Image (tube, helix red, strand yellow):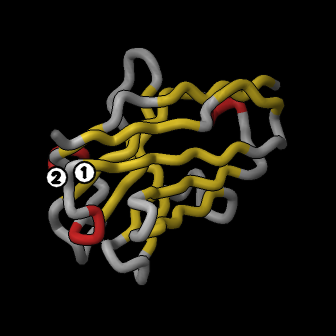
Amino acid sequence: QVQLVESGGGLVQAGGSLRLSCAASGLTFSSYSMGWFRQTPGNEREFVAGITSNNDITSYADSVKGRFTISRDNVKNTVYLQMNSLKPEDTGVYFCAANPNSRYSDRRPRYYIQWGQGTQVTVSS
């Protein structure tokens, strides 16, 4: 049974930092590219960051570029999202997701076949 379990969310003041983790099990983690998405009520899930299977290519939404860093540890089967200089508009539920295309971290949610349950991030002003 495939599981993606996010952790690390919480409440933080603007300008602060959080580190999200996503632990994967039940799949060959190193064969998947991974992505982080976020969603707010009434809005579609939006791409935040992605990383290819062997850590060599990362991509970011323009809104988080320079503030967020995605990384992964294929030994621990975990993907991370370091979020710095947080803004109130970063508030949302953050999801990690697995894409079987190992060489391309697509920005479109429909290409991700496994999703975590999400973790809430709230940034206060």
Instruction: Give the residue at the far top of this rendering.
Output: 41
Identify the residue at horizontal 45%, vertical 47% (top origin): 22
**Element at badge 1?**
loop
**Element at badge 2?**
helix
Which residue type does callout 1 highlight? Arg
In x, y percent, where is residue 8?
Answer: 61, 37
Circles 1 and 2: CB atoms closer than 8 Å? yes
Disc number lying in front (1 or 2): 2
Identify the residue at horizontal 40%, vertical 67% (top origin): 51
Q: In the rendered image of this protein, does residue 120 appear above or below residue 106?
A: above
Residue 99 shown left or right of residue 93 in the figure? left
Q: Alpha-carbon neighbours of circle 1 within 10 Å: few (<14), some, or many (≥20)?
A: few
Residue 110 shown left or right of residue 29 in the figure? left
Report the Cα–Cα distance between label 1 and label 2. 6 Å
Q: Alpha-carbon neighbours of circle 2 within 10 Å: few (<14), some, or many (≥20)?
A: some
Quadrant location of the C terminus in the rendered image? top right
User: Label 1 belongs to which residue?
Assistant: 108
Which residue type does callout 2 highlight? Tyr
Quadrant location of the N terminus in the rendered image? top left
| Nearer-the-camera pick, 52 or 65 | 52
In x, y percent, where is residue 52?
Answer: 34, 72
Q: In the rendered image of this protein, does residue 11 appear above or below residue 66?
A: above
| Total numbered labels placed on residues in the image | 2
In x, y percent, where is residue 12?
Answer: 77, 30
Identify the residue at horizontal 46%, vertical 50% (top origin): 48
Location of residue 37 (image quadrant):
top left
Residue 122 shown left or right of residue 62 in the figure? right
User: Label 2 belongs to which residue?
Assistant: 111
Identify the residue at horizontal 63%, vertical 33% (top origin): 89
In x, y percent, where is residue 72?
Answer: 47, 66
| Numbered mark located on residue 59 in the image | none
